[in-house]
Image: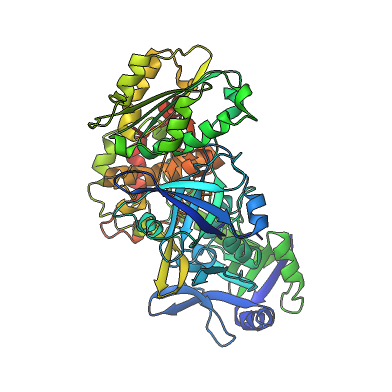
Amino acid sequence: MANPYFPKLVTIEKITIENEARDLKTFRLAFCNRDDKKSFKYECGQFAMLSVPGAGESPIGIASSPLDEQYLEFTVKCYPTGVVTTALHNLEEGARIGVRGPYGNSFPLKELERKNVLIVGGGFAFTTLRSTIRYMLNEKSRARFENITVIYGARSPGELIYKPELKEWEERDEIEMYVTVDRGDEDWKGREGFVPAVLQEIAPSSENAIVLVCGPPIMLKFTMLPLLDLGFSPDRIITSLERRMSCGIGKCGRCNIGTMYVCKDGPVLSYKQIQELSEEIF
Amino acid sequence: MLQGLIKKEDLKKLIASVKKEGTFYGLIRGSEGLSLSELGPDDEVTLDYSNFKMPPKRQFFPFSEVICTYEDESMTDLPLSEEKAVIFGVRPCDALSLLYLDKIFIDEKFTDPYYRSRRDNSLIISLACREPLKTCFCTSVGASPAGKKGADILAFEVKDSLLFEACSEKGTRFMENYPAIFKKPGKADIKARDEEVSAAEKRVQTIDLSGITEKLQGCFDSPLWEEISQRCLGCGVCTYTCPTCHCFGLYDEKVELKGRRIRVQDSCMFPSFTLEASGHNPRTSNEERMRQRIMHKFRYTVENFEDIFCVGCGRCISNCPVNMDIRETLAEVIK
């Protein structure tokens, strides 16, 4: 009987510090065992449990794309009160940790085919959206999607993550990028303003379009109304939820909301599904 | 259906025979009251009780258990228990609770191997109830003093004997293994059993739960949760002693480079249960947690599995330090 609680061993190949505050790091992982690598088949929007022996496990969204065959990436925010995230941030390249997963459902990429895709992200909740953008921009898949528009915001220029990639995407023709910060500094020549305001200003068309939106609860709360105003029906607004989890496989009960478990019935949900839940989500 | 009669004094013979292949668990009265314990042939099997304190889920989903150990950077998962066990003396309400736990721990996609191996290796002999407690309400939630669901064998006390009835193939095979121990019951034994069962059923107090799930669907935002939860201390004893509560956490313990990952039962009644590393907590108040506990048992599990995850054992009532009574809570919801 396979033990679903037992993590697969991985090596941290590379650590990238993503922001000025240095509390966001991207961990590039490689499986120590070839069979484990083969069996870890994931889709955009899924998550995995990162396991640091001695500290415990945390559910983290997968930031690399399924088409990135050579590696697996997770961007992790370190919280002073977070036992696992702190332990992870204290590790160096070459250290070994565990991974369990992939878990949960994924962004409905099949449904996005032949449609315009709007991506709205805020802060470090951009990780699984980055996975999706990387996937869609891959030459193997780009032709399946129509226009791709990205609105991404952070508190300050130093807090924008995946900076080299943002720059690369801004230079490409197959994607339209709107990067914004709440407040710029003297070197910032880009856009300023909160994500919902930028969304209203750009006013992307909702015709034949689906929007994927991830961000802190407060951003989600204030982004829904402008999206509805633009004509996105609640079933075409797709987001991803976070909850404390222990098992990731629908048993431990922590992420239960109504009849669903965020770990196995989510984390990806439409705004329509969220409206139908009794508990207030954001 | 295979039936067999065994003299109470001959239970020791059965225990001795079982012990050749596995472990026999029964009830022993110890310093912490009655509890399921491993029995030897010289132990006195207690039959004189209504129910025991800790539900039988502890046999399959222990309060805490190590699931893997690690040293330096390598991890090892713990081998599964291969102990063959006979668990004797579980009440029918508690035997039913195991079927509910099966729905959580054993499913198509992910099966909990620790729970599963113990379930597969165990045989449940339920003991029909003769003296329901004032806190019992099993017949209102689909269980009964002589219910067979979840049992491999249902035993009845009939004068100086026990009447065993096989309720599953596993139970039948077990009884067939010990032809010398079981005698064929007579008509008088069957009659005595029927009288006991019917008397016990009449003694169980009932509550009206008709429409409880529909009522709960309409009262998520009701002020009644605030009223109900005012008295609750949030100690979680209701969830720890509940035979169907199964929430847990995985925690690491480490000394220098050696450590272990432990699965520990947790409770939705604790604020830390849903507290995230960021400090965000989706259920901050006692009121929300109380609502979650009741909604989970009487609404969400009905919508997901068509079962109320309550067997009416009354442990949450008898163990509550502030005398909260789930029957009153449910009556408030229905009102």
- The residue lying at 59 percent from left, 40 percent from top is A66
Q: Is residue A267 above or below residue A249?
A: above
Please say whether residue B51 is visible from this viewpoint.
Answer: no
Give the colour scheme shown: rainbow
Q: Nearer the viewer, residue A175 or B243?
A: A175
Q: Is residue B161 found left or right of B290 in the rendered image?
A: right
For residue A218, what is the image quadrant?
A: top left
Please say whether residue A40 is visible from this viewpoint.
Answer: yes
> How many numbered badges does the structure rendering display?
0
For residue B234, what is the image quadrant?
A: bottom left
Q: Nearer the viewer, residue A237 or B83?
A: A237
Q: x and y percent of residue A179 in the render?
A: 37, 27
Q: Residue furthest bottom?
A: B42
Q: Is residue A77 above or below residue B24?
A: above
- Quadrant assignment for the C terminus of chain A: top left
- The residue lying at 34 percent from left, 61 percent from top is B319
Q: Nearer the viewer, residue A95 or B251?
A: A95
- Quadrant assignment for the N terminus of chain A: bottom right
For residue B64, what is the image quadrant?
A: bottom left
Q: x and y percent of residue A204 in the render?
A: 43, 15
Q: x and y percent of residue B36 in the render?
A: 50, 73
- The residue lying at 62 percent from left, 79 percent from top is B11
Q: Is residue B254 found left or right of B176 in the rendered image?
A: left
